[in-house]
Amino acid sequence: MSTASTSGPGLDDLVKLELKVLAKDESAAAAEEFIPVFHRWITERVLPELLIDVADYSHVHEGPGVLLVGHDAIYAYDQSRGEPGLLYSRRRETAPESAGIATLDQRLDSLLRCAFRACDQIEAEPQLAGRVTFDRRRIELRVNDRLFAADDDMVAALESAFSRALAASDIGNGDGPVTLERIGEARERLTFRTA
């Protein structure tokens, strides 16, 4: 499925994507509590990828929170729009785990797996004592690459691919499949949210 836009590269070439899994409740854990957790993840190699550093933006109101910077992706306890959650932001695909990703469908499946793995890890963190849980049915997908114009064909193709990835991951809303809505303004990065 090469969904090439007339104004840019095809969606199968889109690597810079962000996936945010929203927290179930207003967390009882402060963003600063993620700093030692993420530092330990680096030293203990908790995730199967190269993790480099931790950045603290918890002082920024409704900002990026605390970031765990990796070579291929950034993980964050993100607080944007006043909605805490785990943000997984892929920048490149050089890790062995990314080998063989050639289509948008494969990439979205990989994004979900990586984000959910980090959510599981956070929920099991002894230092956070079960105070942070995530709702795996409340997810946002954002295109983080301005080279991909959000024309009608691209929007429809990405929405369809994301719906397939969610269904394949067994993410539903009660009795039926989850629905998606586009959020934000047209000038903002293309973002879908499960509804």
Image (cartoon, rainbow, N blue to C red):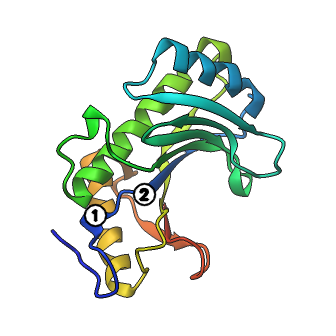
**Which residue lies under the disc numbered 2?**
16
* Neighbours of disc 1 within 10 Å: few (<14), some (14-19), many (20+): some
Can residue 30 be seen here? The reply is no
Which percent across, then down, holds residue 21? 52, 45
Instruction: State which quarter of the image contains the N terminus.
Output: bottom left
Which percent across, then down, holds residue 29? 74, 28
143 is higher (above) or lower (below) than 173: below
User: Left or right: 95 with respect to 180?
Assistant: left
**Disc 2 and disc 1: Cα gap in Å?**
9 Å
Q: Locate residue 31: give its quadrant.
A: top right
User: Left or right: 175 with respect to 186?
Assistant: left
Which percent across, then down, holds residue 152? 37, 86
Seen at 63% across and 29% down, the residue is 132
User: Left or right: 152 with respect to 69?
Assistant: left
**Which residue lies under the disc numbered 1?**
13
Assign a secondary structure to mark 1.
helix
Q: Nearer the viewer, residue 59 or 177?
A: 59
Seen at 84% across and 42% down, the residue is 59
Assign a secondary structure to mark 2.
loop
Tag 2 and tag 1, C-beta contact below 8 Å: no
37 is higher (above) or lower (below) than 187: above
What amino acid is at disc 2?
A: Lys
Which percent across, then down, holds residue 48? 37, 25
Q: Nearer the viewer, residue 183 or 146?
A: 146
Seen at 42% across and 57% down, the residue is 16
Can residue 108 be seen here? The reply is yes
36 is higher (above) or lower (below) than 167: above
